[in-house]
Amino acid sequence: MSDQGAALGARLRKRDLSAAPATLNLLESTTAADREQAAALLHEVSPAALNQEAPGHIVGITGPPGAGKSTLLSALLHAWRAQEESVAMLAVDPSSRQSGGSLLGDRARIDFDPADRGVFIRSTAAGERLGGLAWGTRAAAQALAAAFDVVVIETVGVGQAETDIADVADTVAVVVQPGSGDALQFLKSGIMEIPDVLVVTKADLGQVAISARRDLSAALRSLGSRSTPVIAVSSLPPPSGVEELVQALGVHRANLDLSERRLRARRGGALTDFANEHGERGLRALGGRTAARSWLAEQDRGCSEAALVELLERRMGR
Amino acid sequence: MMRTYAGHSTAKASNELYRGNLAKGQTGLSVAFDLPTQTGYDPDDELARGEVGKVGVPVSHRGDMATLMQGIPLGEMNTSMTINATAAWLLALYIVAAEEHDVPQEQLQGTTQNDIIKEFLARGTYAFPPAPSMRLIADMIAYTVEHVPKWNPINICSYHLQEAGATPVQEIAYAMSNAIAVLDAARERIDASPAHSSEELMGQVFGRISFFVNAGVRFIEEHAKLRAMGILWEELGRERYGVHDQRQLRFRYGVQVNSLGLTEAQPENNVQRIVLETLAVTLGRDARARAIQLPAWNEALGLPRPWDQQWSLRIQQVMAYETDILEYPDIFAGSKVMEGLVAELLEGARAEMAVVAEHGGAVEAVPYMKAALVDSHRERLRRIESGEQVVVGQNRFTETEPSPLTDDAEGGILVVDHAVEAEAIEAVRRWRSERDQSAVDSALAELARVARSDDPHENLMLPTIAAARAGATTGEWSQTLREVFGSYRAPTGVGEAASAPAGDQDLAELREEVARLQEQLGRRPKILVGKPGLDGHSNGAEQIAVRARDAGMDVVYEGIRLTPSQIAASALQEGVHVIGLSILSGSHRELIPAVIDALHEAGVDVPVVVGGIIPEQDVAPLKQAGVAAVYTPKDFDITRIMRDIVELVGAGIPAAA
């Protein structure tokens, strides 16, 4: 029996960034043997093993296609690297074809130094999964947060996608471009949950960007959220707003009850995974979703998500 | 005018080649620059590795330009330069070289290609983002109209669009949309200039814009395409730009006939293809090319030798001097068939131009046009693979006798001496150490200042010429502007490409194969498609990427111009199962082993396959370096290549798993 999973987990716990590629290869795999190793890996980086929540900041960044996310991510990457923070980026591509294959082009849009060991970028396809995340992305974010200072999950969409990303990220930033009314409409109609940070790109467009920022701020106020920052950024030289955004993300994280948010994320994620795997029949065996949720709330706070899924499965088979 | 596109190795060797070609009856020069010069790097730059002197001549400074033009009467010569991102710089070097021979710039005749939009779309030798690139073009137009009046500052190229798969309708529509973007940018410059009557100046600018088109083997339709372009051009001049002078309204074009359709299999057949393609641009006088250059029969094999180029020149000479093609007025006047064809193309092109306009014009529509071209090219390949489109010697009538043309030691092509690169590196370093550095520094500082300025009266040509005179290098000029303008990656077009049409049995079987492989691997098979080096011919890589997706794989494709270390970092981080590399510029012997070394260093142990224009004798050394398989233009069945790749990945799985 190999101890590959546990060994990788131990390397991550020691903040060995070079463990990232093999970690992803394992966590994305669906074979039974790999899943067993993956569970061992996740156990090594669980709060129980770390004696605390994984220290990295998990940031979710989402927005519609063409909103300028890639350019923004390049700028953020440079800002974080300038502060010597290590960064892992998990770019989730929504493309799903009848062939099942996908073209992962996002990497090309992010400008970074290939010799820089403090940066890790991985692209994955969401495939047929609902909710915008790829198989293994949540587990990967939780594992990499043990080693990297910042873990970014990038997804595409406005409206539904960020609810899934909110299940795993400490801080969710929604990116919109000026002139597209979608975000405003979704906010007002309640389709979109209020993000932790709103980013308006292409601030170089001038008046359009200024009014977009004003409209969004007004909408947030009318929804009773006075604290959500709305930040305008421009990636064109001279870039602006990026420092401010980095700061806003940091402030949100500092004011967060991290262990509560992570705990909620792990329990919610475990239930989602269980339901994906075993369907309604599986949930009925647990006495329904609500019963399952309250049963999960009684389990050890330090359990990894994978361990929680295993507990649920054991309970189902009881 | 008769030319051959030529240049390789060094300025000195190319100068000898030009003088030889002129002695054989060629009437103008067509300069091919190497990729580092085209993309703005000196020979000693990391990215220039393996590319120096390969597809053209390296020109790093005014000394190289003087050597290149040694003994050629610049006051009388008509020189066409295939140069785009760095066109302003090469024109400046040409002006300075002429100045040294007391030839004033007013006398210089020729063309700089200078069409950046098609570089974003099809050819890949861009250096700066779209907006500053358009500014450079507008500045050159404004400068030459006034100071180098016989120069064609820009040549709208639809040539490369057809090479990238454009249909005749797309070629017309994108060329015209591109011209509109350029003319609109020039008009802004002109309106800002108080010195002239802007209407008169606009007419002059319009009259100086020429085109560079492609002509395929379906030569009747191709001729109709050129007639349609003439009609649209005149219409555009009158209606959009208020031009009335009949001479200024004339559609002027040069041509290089189609290379895309030239085959590696039975390459001698390319000679008749070239002849037929030439008919497309010569048959009817009302739409006849002003300058023709013909590719060589062995282009799909490697670099043509002087003898191969002579053969292409002789084709033109036979047509011009032996046939009666030039003796009649327009032979299609009154032809119902031709009129119908032209009308059909016009209708299609107008509709497509409207789509580009809706996207906000050619600059904004680059991603849309790119995706459309990738789709067209895929459709073309599908027809060839299925046999719907016959390519003699390739997918039909493939039996052949051994060819006496390709049985020499080099395989019937030119092999550039590998010492050329080291010499060029040495030479550019010597140049830098021997010049007046403070003069160069202040010239580049002035260039940067003008580049940062948004005053429309500040023209980048002036500090560019001053920097050329001071002895700055190609890499220094470009780097100065990159620092101000930022760098840029063009869209790859593959993400938007439509799914494969249903009902392709081979592809369906392959998908099942991929699904089985996925179960074994635990993950969907993932492939990295990479283009190392400066070669921008991305059609092949794009088609491989799209087909791999259609076969059910996850595909990481980052576009062109990657260093070996970038490719290795991507392969490691993305956890790919196989790597496909594409090179068409002839630098595979240096770059492929460099990528494999970088992969070893990164600890990535997955199979590497290579595609491109790879001469037969290079296959064995590549395999020795660790390449699992090599594909060349004769392997036109991409689904089959995919099947090989899937097998290769499957063979790497340990049996116990």
Image (tube, helix red, strand yellow):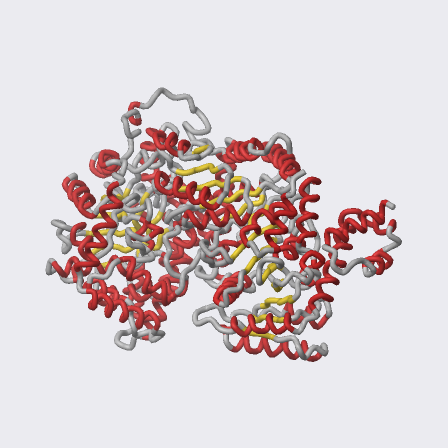
Task: Residue at 66%, 57% (x, y): give it.
Answer: A142
Residue A260 versus residue B103: which sits nearer the camera?
Answer: A260
Residue B251 visible from this viewpoint: no
Residue A190: x and y, percent? 73, 69
- Residue A104 placement, left or right of A44: left
Query: Which residue is outermost to the right?
Result: A287
Q: How many circles with numbers are drawn on the protein?
A: 0
Residue B129: x and y, percent? 41, 61
- Residue B210 placement, left or right of A111: left
Task: Residue at 11%, 49% (x, y): give it.
Answer: B71
Residue B241 versus residue B533: which sits nearer the camera?
Answer: B533
Q: Which quadrant holds the N terminus of chain A?
A: top right
Residue A28 versus residue B125: which sits nearer the camera?
Answer: A28
Q: Is residue A158 positioned above or below B500 on the image?
A: below
Residue B154 visible from this viewpoint: yes
Task: Residue at 37%, 43% (x, y): give it.
Answer: B591
Task: Residue at 76%, 60% (x, y): give it.
Answer: A301
- Residue B119 placement, left or right of A223: left
- Residue B608 placement, left or right of B525: left
Residue B365: x and y, percent? 48, 59
Q: Is residue B477 positioned above or below B51 on the image?
A: below
Residue B278 versus residue B159: which sits nearer the camera?
Answer: B159
Q: Is residue B253 positioned above or below B189 on the image?
A: above
Residue A27: x and y, percent? 65, 48
Q: Is residue B420 positioned above or below A187 on the image?
A: above
